[in-house]
Image: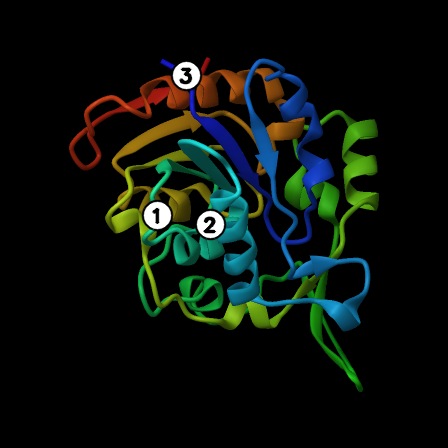
Amino acid sequence: MTMPSLLLVPGAWHKPEHLQLLIDEMPDIDVHTVALTSCGDDPKSLGDMYSDAAAIKAAVEAIDGPVVVVAHSYGGVPVTQALVGTANVESIVYLAAFQLDAGDSLLSSVGGNSAPWWQLHRTEGVGDYMTVAGPVGVFYGDVDPAIAEKAAAELGYQSYAAITQELTAVAWQTIPSTYIICEADNAIPPFAQELFAQRARKTLRLNASHSPFLSQPSTLAQLLRDELTSAEDPRPSLNGGQRKAA
């Protein structure tokens, strides 16, 4: 049996290049990434959540064969929106991600209030966008300092509209999903991840910060290999099991 392809979807402010250490751990797997329209280096040209969803759907449809989609952080929102009705998606892996329901937005899921480290910019002639205060501490708590500083320098601007837009479709209701909780996460508190994970069919755990693709790429790669191997197995019952990565 041929292993499914893997599509990696980054979170807010992040780009496909942030995922390269993880990709390097999987040279024998057909790995794809997608650049989100809501993140970029020019705040005047940022897209939103719905255009992110369109980009993700296009990336999935361009893959010839079954695929497992991995959504990190904010990426869980447009992935949930995008994948309803896609014929070749075997499962979704939510990695410290927002696994939301219809009518939810990222902003509503955190109580309607901006996180203290979100820096909102409102400039005439430019759509509202955000930067991050102290990204190393927020995203990369257990990452090698040199890698963390490089990752922080490569962050883009993030569209504010993308976090306010509501889901109108919910892929995890019909596609099996796994939630990976990052237990040392400073960006999405683990207790919030626990609540999101109740919507998944399986829960895994990593003793990691918000960015295990930088701090523990080999461990995360093994978890994803296991997901690819089991993607075509009979679907487990809701919250059918939990395990913790070493």
- What residue is pinned by disc 3? 2
Rendered view: 205 above or below 44: above
Badge 2: residue crowd in 10 Å (few <14, some 14–19, many ≥20): many
As rendered, which of 92 and 215 lies closer to the eye? 92
List x then y, in percent, for residue 228: 41, 22
Who is closer to the viewer here, 71 or 65?
65
Residue at which label 1 appears: 196
Nearer to us in this view, 101 or 174 = 174
Q: Quadrant of the N terminus?
A: top left
- Amino acid carrying label 1: it is Phe
Q: Secondary structure at mark 1?
A: helix
Mark nearer the viewer, 2 or 3: 3
> Residue 211's image quarter?
top right
In the rendered structure, the answer to whether residue 155 lies left or right of residue 30 reads right
Regarding mark 3 in the picture, which secondary structure is present there? loop
Q: Which residue is mark 2?
A: 76
Give the residue displayed 43% in from the left and 25% down from the top.
4
Q: Are marks 1 and 3 in contact (CB under 8 Å)?
A: no
Mark 2 near mark 3, Cβ–Cβ under 8 Å? Answer: no
Q: Amino acid at mark 2?
A: Gly
Report how far apart the C-alphas of labels 2 and 3 lie in the structure. 26 Å
Does residue 78 appear to the left or right of 23 in the view shown? left
Q: Position of residue 157 (x, y in %)?
A: 74, 60
Q: How far is disc 1 from disc 3 in space, using C-alphas?
A: 31 Å
Q: CA distance from mark 2 to mark 1?
A: 11 Å
Label whose residue precedes the other's in the sequence (2 or 3): 3
**Residue at x 32% of width, y 20% of height:** 230
